[in-house]
Amino acid sequence: MTVVFDERSALLIIDMLNDFIEESGSLVVPGAKRIVPRIREILEAARSQGVPVIYVADSHRRDDREFAYWPPHAVAGTWGSEVVGELAPAPDDYVVPKRRYSAFFGTDLDNYLRELEVRKLYLTGVLTNICVYATALDAAMRNYEVAVFRDGVASLSEETDAFIFQQLKEVLQAELI
């Protein structure tokens, strides 16, 4: 399926990290490996159209408070915190480390987007109901248009995805692709 991006848009690839995707990761999302080829297609389309690519990557301290309710994962500087090899960032891509669910919370993402004069964000990655949704919500609150690739995101269940897709569409007026 050919992807055509709107003008003044950017592609966000959220948390496609070894710890979430690879079998030996510390917090594997079941079925997330299946979206890697589709995200690769989307990524190639973005690059060929000159659309900025921004990787949003969990990057935690070893003593992060989030580990009180999630197993330790994506610890900065470890294999688990690296983007999976099939989707590796190119030299001109942006990488935005984050410590919380939203790609906007405590990061430079909004600054990059404003400097690039981006108006619309296309989202891919994991988990649909956590980091993807939190990022979509914060993007909408900042008046960005939001589009989500239904076949480029994953959560722990199809039921969860269906609910979040409904929320994205009804609450955020997001475009579902």
Image (spheres, grey):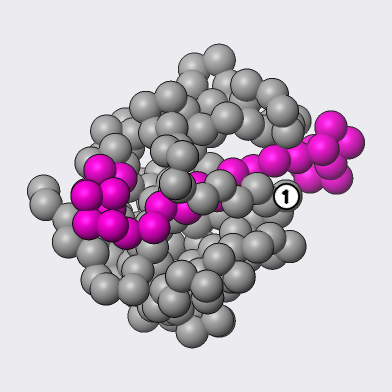
The residue that label 1 is drawn on is 99
For the C terminus, the quadrant is: bottom left
Residue extent of the magenta highlight: 43-70
Label 1 environment density (alpha carbons within 10 Å; few <14, some 14–19, many ≥20): many
Quadrant housing residue 79: top right
Residue drawn at x 32%, y 59% as measured from the top left: 51
Q: State left or right for residue 65 relative to residue 122.
A: right
31 or 93, nearer to the observer:
93
Relative image position of residue 92 (x, y in whole percent)? 44, 46
- Answer whether residue 82 is magenta in the image: no
Q: Residue furthest right?
A: 63
Quadrant housing residue 148: bottom left
Residue 35 makes an appearance in the image: yes
Residue drawn at x 75%, y 40% as measured from the top left: 60
- Residue type, numbered disc 1: Arg
Relative image position of residue 38 (x, y in whole percent)? 25, 40
Relative image position of residue 88 (x, y in whole percent)? 43, 32
Q: Residue furthest front?
A: 91
Is residue 134 shown above or below 39? Answer: below
Q: State left or right for residue 50 relative to residue 61.
A: left
